[in-house]
Image (spheres, rainbow, N blue to C red):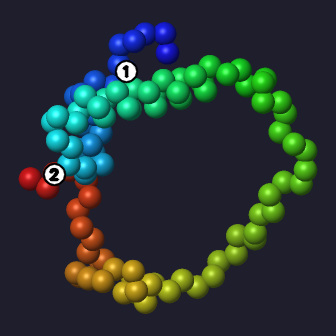
Amino acid sequence: MTSDRPVVTPAVARKVAELARLRLPEEDLVLWSAQLSRIVAYIDQLAAIPEESFGAAPAGPATPVRADDPRPGLGEQALEANAPRQLHGYGVVPRVVGSGS
């Protein structure tokens, strides 16, 4: 990173915290902004390394692929095991996107 100006502003840090559902006190925003800016700067340094520096991928057998054969699923049994609550035959899960208001 060539500039001393932070890449991540307090407003961006606030939004990241909101998306991650973290409670971030206003007085910590400057610290978080600086820390996130350092992380982004480090990633920028990694991105600047030419791909040729890594060399070619090692030769060897490809990852084995299993046959794509149909097999019975567990259907409602799996739903009941993974969704503790159901409504009209569908699993009910907590809202994870948006504020809910």
Residue name at image x 37 percent, y 21 percent? 7
Front-lying residue, 95 or 50: 50
Sequence-first disc among 1 and 2: 1
Element under disc 2: loop
Q: Residue 82: x and y, percent?
A: 39, 80
Marks 1 and 2 in Cβ contact (< 8 Å):
no
In this rendering, which labeled residue sits more in front, label 1 or label 2?
Answer: 1
Residue located beneath label 1 in the image:
7
- Asked which quadrant contains residue 96, the reply is bottom left
Q: Amino acid at mark 2?
A: Ser
Q: Residue 65: x and y, percent?
A: 77, 63
Q: Amino acid at mark 1?
A: Val
Residue located beneath label 2 in the image:
99
Front-lying residue, 42 or 78: 42
Q: Residue 2: x and y, percent?
A: 48, 10
Residue name at image x 35 percent, y 19 percent? 6
The extreme bottom residue here reads 77
